Amino acid sequence: MDLSEVADELYGLVPAEFRAVRDERVKQARAAGDRDLAAAITKLRKPTVSAWLVNQLAREAPDELASLLELGEALREAQRALDGDTLRELSTRRRRGVSALVQQSKRLARAARQTVTAQVEREVAASLEAAVADQDAADAIVAGRLTSALYHVGLGSADTGGDGVGPEWAAAGQPARRLRAVPDPAGKPKRAAAAAAGQRRTREPAARRRASELTPAERAEREAEQQAAREAAAAERKAREIAAAERDLSEAEALAADASSALDEAERQLASARSRRKSLQSELAELEQRLVTAQTEDAKAARELRAAQRSREAATGSLSTAQRRVQRAKVKLEKLR
């Protein structure tokens, strides 16, 4: 057992199982006498639901994820070449790819009986968008060990006219910071983006000196290129805004559909309740009528009972009188004999 194997296992589990399995692996490492491994495993952090879903995509849909990430370099090349038509085409493909993978993540969540809220869905989409925008993020997502969602909050000088310090990342709900993922213990940290940023900063003073030596025509051409770059960046931002609006629309439509279904069910329940109450009221009216009839019959029976009791009492008195007469007659007859 090594840290890489444990990390791969833990970040493939549903979040609810993470801590229990992690603690068990810590115990196993300690029992084996490897205190360094136990300490390293203890530091592994439970992933958020959105990070877990992205990790699941890396495991369960690697081909679809690879197809999306391949668009990243093509998009960056189109931006460098100021190729607006290609940029628009690739942006459309990126939106479709992100949407398809978000739906795939929801299917994986349902299979694992994991609830996906609208916020979680947005975080999954944002992480995938981030992976398309930057190779470091793509590598982190493919490794399948994210601990929190990723947001791309800076696109460098080509897109924003900034200082060229390179992309930044933010975990869900947190200030901008570097990637939140567990690295491969056997690998080395990637420094390509930082090195490229340093090279850009080194080149900037020389570029400014060269710009001062340009002819008016060259400066006009340079300005046209910069304007084209700004337009391409604006087109990319607009494409992202459209993608976000489309996701919001999809969520709103889903909510409306759920609400409509809930209303239909409520209407059915209301109609059923009304029918049931009407039936019970009819039954109650019938029972009340039967009660009135029974009460009338009971009063009649009570009168007949009292009359019968009086007749019985009279008959009893007559029988007693007759029996006494019979007895006297017998006595008299005996004397005469």
Image (cartoon, grey):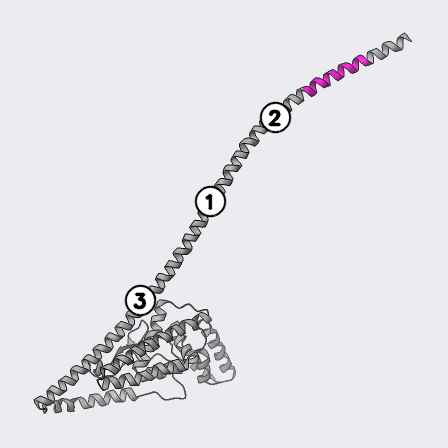
Indicate whether residue 121 is drawn in magenta.
Answer: no
**Label 3–label 1 contact, CB within 8 A:** no
Image check: 245 left or right of 334? left
Q: Of label 3 and label 1, which has the lower sequence position? A: 3
Q: Which residue is pictured at 29% across the width and 85% down the height?
A: 74
Q: Is residue 48 visible?
A: no
Image check: 75 left or right of 210? right
Residue 234 vertical placement versus 270 (above, below): below
Q: Which residue is pictured at 26% across the width and 75% down the height?
A: 239
Q: Can you identify the residue that label 3 sits on?
A: 249
Give, as a three-letter code, the residue at label 1: Arg
Q: Position of residue 67 (x, y in %)?
A: 36, 82
Question: Residue lying furthest right in this view?
Answer: 337
Q: Of label 3 and label 2, which has the lower sequence position? A: 3
**Residue extent of the magenta highlight:** 311-326
Q: Kindly state the secondary structure of the residue where label 1 is placed.
A: helix
Q: Can you identify the residue that label 1 sits on?
A: 277
Within 10 Å of disc 1 (Cα), the crowding (few <14, some 14-19, many 20+) is few
Quadrant in which the C terminus appears: top right
Q: Can you identify the residue that label 2 sits on?
A: 302
- As measured in the structure, the alpha-carbon distance from the residue carrying label 3 to the one carrying label 2 is 77 Å
Image check: 155 left or right of 281? left
Give, as a three-letter code, the residue at label 3: Leu
Q: Is residue 122 visible?
A: yes
What secondary structure characterizes most of the magenta part? helix
Give, as a three-letter code, the residue at label 2: Ala
Within 10 Å of disc 3 (Cα), the crowding (few <14, some 14-19, many 20+) is few
Question: Residue lying furthest left in this view?
Answer: 216
